[in-house]
Image (cartoon, rainbow, N blue to C red):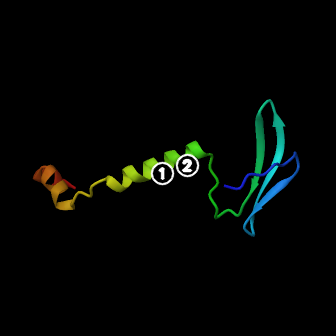
C-alpha cells in the first residue's frame, strides 16, 4: 500500500487517466474528488462489497429448463394463449 500525505487541492494520479483530488478536510473527514473515464466504475467500498455479494448470489441461481415450467402450467391455460 502506498501511503501519501496530501493537502487540500493536491492530487494523486493513478495510471494515465484517473485522478484523485483532495477537496477538503473537516473534523476528521476527507472529501475526495475522483476524475475517471466513464468506463471505469467508481464506488464507495461498502457499495462495491454489496455489488460483489449480489453478483455471487446471482451466479448461484439455477436455470430452470422451459420444459419444467411447462409442466407447471395446466394444459388448458397453455392452449388458450
Q: Quadrant of the C terminus?
A: bottom left
Q: Is residue 33 left or right of residue 70?
A: right
Give me the disc on residue 52. 1
Q: Position of residue 8 (x, y in %)?
A: 87, 45
Query: Which quarter of the figure has residue 27?
Result: top right
Residue sitting nearer the eye, 7 or 38:
7
Residue sitting nearer the eye, 48 or 65:
48
Seen in the picture, residue 54 relative to 27 is either above or below; the reply is below
Seen in the picture, residue 30 relative to 36 is either above or below; the reply is above
Q: Can you identify the residue that label 2 sits on?
A: 48
Query: Which quarter of the figure has residue 30?
Result: top right
**Which residue does the image show at 78% across and 42% down from the upper left?**
31
Residue sitting nearer the eye, 18 or 78:
18
CA neighbours of label 2 inside 10 A, class few (<14), some (14 to 19), many (20+): few
Q: Position of residue 76 (x, y in %)?
A: 12, 51
CA neighbours of label 1 inside 10 A, class few (<14), some (14 to 19), many (20+): few
Q: Position of residue 52 (x, y in %)?
A: 48, 51
Give me the disc on residue 69. none
Q: Are marks 2 and 1 in contact (CB under 8 Å)?
A: yes
Q: Residue lying farthest top?
A: 27
Q: Secondary structure at mark 1?
A: helix
Q: Position of residue 18 (x, y in %)?
A: 74, 62
Q: Tell me how far mark 2 sits from mark 1, CA to CA.
A: 6 Å
Q: Secondary structure at mark 2?
A: helix
Count of numbered marks: 2
Q: Is residue 40 left or right of residue 14?
A: left
Q: Is residue 71 left or right of residue 18?
A: left
Amino acid at each position: 500500500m502506498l501511503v501519501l500525505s496530501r493537502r487540500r487541492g493536491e492530487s494523486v494520479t493513478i495510471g494515465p487517466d484517473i485522478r484523485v483530488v483532495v477537496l477538503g478536510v473537516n473534523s476528521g473527514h476527507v472529501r475526495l474528488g475522483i476524475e475517471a473515464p466513464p468506463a471505469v466504475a467508481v464506488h464507495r467500498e461498502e457499495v462495491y462489497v454489496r455489488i460483489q455479494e449480489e453478483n455471487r448470489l446471482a451466479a448461484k441461481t439455477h436455470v430452470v429448463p422451459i420444459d419444467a415450467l411447462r409442466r407447471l402450467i395446466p394444459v388448458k391455460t397453455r392452449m388458450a394463449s
